[in-house]
Image: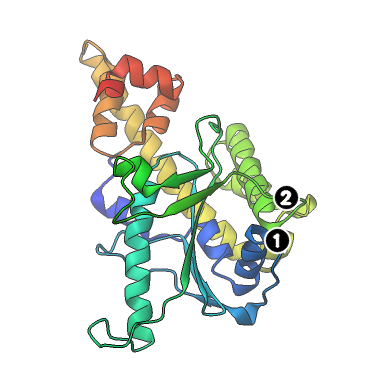
Amino acid sequence: MNVTEETKSKYIAKDSVFRNLFGIKKYAAQLYMALHPDETVTEDDIEHVTLESVIMATLYNDVGFKVKDKIIMLVEQQSTWTENIAVRMLVYLAETYYDYFKDTKQSLYDEPKVKMPKPDLYVLYTGTDKKNVPPYISLSESYLGGDNSVLDFKVKVVTDGKDGDIIQQYVRFTKIYNEQVKLYGRNAKAVYETIRICEDENVLADYMKSREREVSGIMLAFSDVTSELNLYVDSKVRTAEAKGEAKGALSTLVDLVKKKLLSVSQAAEQANMTVEEFEEKSGLKDE
């Protein structure tokens, strides 16, 4: 079964639970307070500025909102770690400010200095390989050789919340879903069991109960495309092995990584290796 460009576009266009959850002002306010425990905000203080498209129609950010017109908060969720999130944030932030200046009718060519909210950038990492995840990513340190004289910002990295806050609940939701996928595969059973367990454990329970049909639809759409991708990968690997290629499955997985159909972590999982083992045996570590 082939993963066509149309299928990939449909997947990218689909919503995510993260984007849907924090696209609701009530939960966006909770997210802000979880990251700023000394402050209190209400739904009325929140205005979403999440991008629907950035440069290309297939690229958009997860969550963006203004707080009291003083702060622009961008939050991305990643289950696979990459420092490239800092570069993506640079693009998202520039586009968000561009929209802000248009919406507030401020010209960058007029004499008066424009007013702009302070940026507040985060990535929520929900993957399992946390040992190599830093507390923040600095654009200058990671990409500009430490030169912060012209351009720099930091993306703060979060791996969990505290005391049952909205971040801790979302992280628990992702763990429950992963556990159910291991038991049942990426299908409706895993989705419905995830929702049931979340409600029983009071994990995003209000959100799940009020939007159960919507949430299950989002998760099922993700499951369908992921299953299709897995079938495609299995087919490619079996074909390579049948042809007697020297490295068989490994060379096929490397090819899929280079074509950006799989991430390194997904390919490592298919090969039953750790990311480090896969990179070393595949030669990707040296590229």
Scheme of image coloration: rainbow
- The mark found on residue 131 in the picture is none
What is the three-letter code of the residue carrying label 1? Pro
Residue identifier under label 1: 37
**Horizontal and vertical percent position of residue 79:** 50, 42
Side of 33 where 92 appears, left or right: left
Q: Nearer the viewer, mark 2 or mark 1?
A: 1
Instruction: State whether residue 211 appears in this view.
Output: no
Residue at (21%, 13%) from the top-left corner?
Answer: 245
Residue at (53%, 64%) from the top-left corner?
Answer: 20
**Horizontal and vertical percent position of residue 215:** 58, 60
What is the three-letter code of the residue carrying label 2? Lys
Tell me if residue 113 comes above or below residue 257 in the rendering: below
Of the 4 image quadrants, the one containing the N terminus is top left
Marked residue nearer the N-terminal end (2 or 1): 1
Of the 4 image quadrants, the one containing the C terminus is top left
* SS under mark 1: loop
Is the residue under label 1 in contact with that under label 2 (CB below 8 Å)? yes
Instruction: State whether residue 99 appears in this view.
Output: yes
Marks 2 and 1, how far apart at CA? 10 Å
Residue identifier under label 2: 162
